[in-house]
Image (cartoon, rainbow, N blue to C red):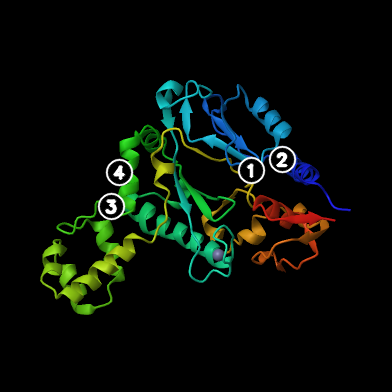
Amino acid sequence: METSDGEKLNLIKRYYREYFKDAVKNRWLEIPEDIRHREIGYGYLKKVDNRNLSFDSEREYLRWVLDRSPFHLYKSLAYMEHPSSVGGAQKKGLFRREIAFDIDVHRVKRCTHKDDGWVCNHCLEEGKNQVFILIDEFLIPDFGLSKEDIRIVFSGNRGYHIYIKPRDEDIRNTIEHWGREERRCLIEYILGKNLNLNYVGSGWRRRILKAIKNKRLLAQLERSNNWKSIIERKSEREKKRILKIIEDVKNRLELDEKVMEDDIRLLRVIGSLHGYTGFVVKEVKYNSLEYFDPLKDAVYPKFNREYYNVKIKERIDSLRIGDNLYTYRSREVPVSVILYLFGHGVDFEIC
Ligand SMILES: [Zn+2]
């Protein structure tokens, strides 16, 4: 006997509920700081079906999460006087905002899947690689932050959220009171948007010089701040080649600018599940990021214990969970795969 769509949805909901029960009981679900001033959003089949929710206490928030167990759960980066008011920053009375980057990686050349929305080792590795670039080549050397000032969170899909949380209260106070303009400056700097070749500052100078292999050119650039005049004197071909190297260094990071800029932006609650994959939105310590394998470490272990008989009715890309590879021919799959297939809108039957 096969299940109807409604029964399938109920089954999925049951597992989300079970998950949140454990996450709340064992306290790994994030309770946004100063919950009364934060906006909560959530969704089931769409990412954000609903927003403008707020709670008076942590208990009330946790009770609501247990009751609803949404497939997507978000909190505002901003702290607001009226988080449940509908409208922009002004209506909501925004008075403070967390600083966070959203690295959202796309399919890379080496990916084993055709579907842009799928995941594999290669794109997941690229996401991690970009986290290291952002932290090791920008946040630490250019901004004087240390690893302890940064929180790394796997987004549950193909990216990471990087929160800047300086331990120094004064610095944290300063940056969390930044307005839109200041946050835009920060992200534009990191994306190299206002890079001026007439005068290349130290951070960008260091990053670009690292990418130049030609010794003679390197020596020339090292001697001067005005790179434009050096590049202008080169042949057309050479000029193009150098500019391409600079562009490539600038384009290494896929950062969602809106997440940095937008005043009332929502970001996934740490410890919730990502409704497209069923993976945990999971914090990863800097020192263990190198060995972090989302397809293993962000899968809730209980979701790999129970199996269902399924019939997958379309030719989908294969999916690795832990050490197992699943294809459209797989007949027996764990709950983790059921959640992933469901989240991706794959046509399948549970027998
Ligand atoms: Zn991939």
Where does residue 54 sit, x and y in percent of width and height?
A: 58, 25
Quadrant of the image occupied by residue 321: bottom right
Quick one: 332 or 65, which is closer to the camera?
A: 332
- Disc 2 + disc 1, Cβ < 8 Å: yes
**Circle nearer the N terminus (4, 1):** 4
Q: Residues within 10 Å of mark 3 (few under 14, many from 20)?
A: few
Determine which residue is flagged by label 2: 20
Quadrant of the image occupied by residue 209: bottom left
- Disc 1 + disc 3, Cβ < 8 Å: no
User: SS for tag 4?
Assistant: helix
Please tell me in which quarter of the rendered image ligand 1 is found. Answer: bottom right
- In the picture, the quarter occupied by the C terminus is bottom right
- Mark 4 or 3, closer to the camera: 3
**Circle nearer the N terminus (2, 1):** 2
User: SS for tag 3?
Assistant: loop
Identify the residue at horizontal 60%, vertical 48% (top origin).
281
Determine which residue is flagged by label 4: 185
Identify the residue at horizontal 58%, vertical 41% (top origin).
47
**Circle nearer the N terminus (1, 3):** 3
**Circle nearer the N terminus (4, 3):** 4
Q: CA distance from mark 4 to mark 3?
A: 9 Å
Q: Residues within 10 Å of mark 2 (few under 14, many from 20)?
A: many
Q: CA distance from mark 2 to mark 1?
A: 8 Å
Where does residue 27 sit, x and y in percent of width and height?
A: 68, 39
Number of numbered labels in the structure image: 4
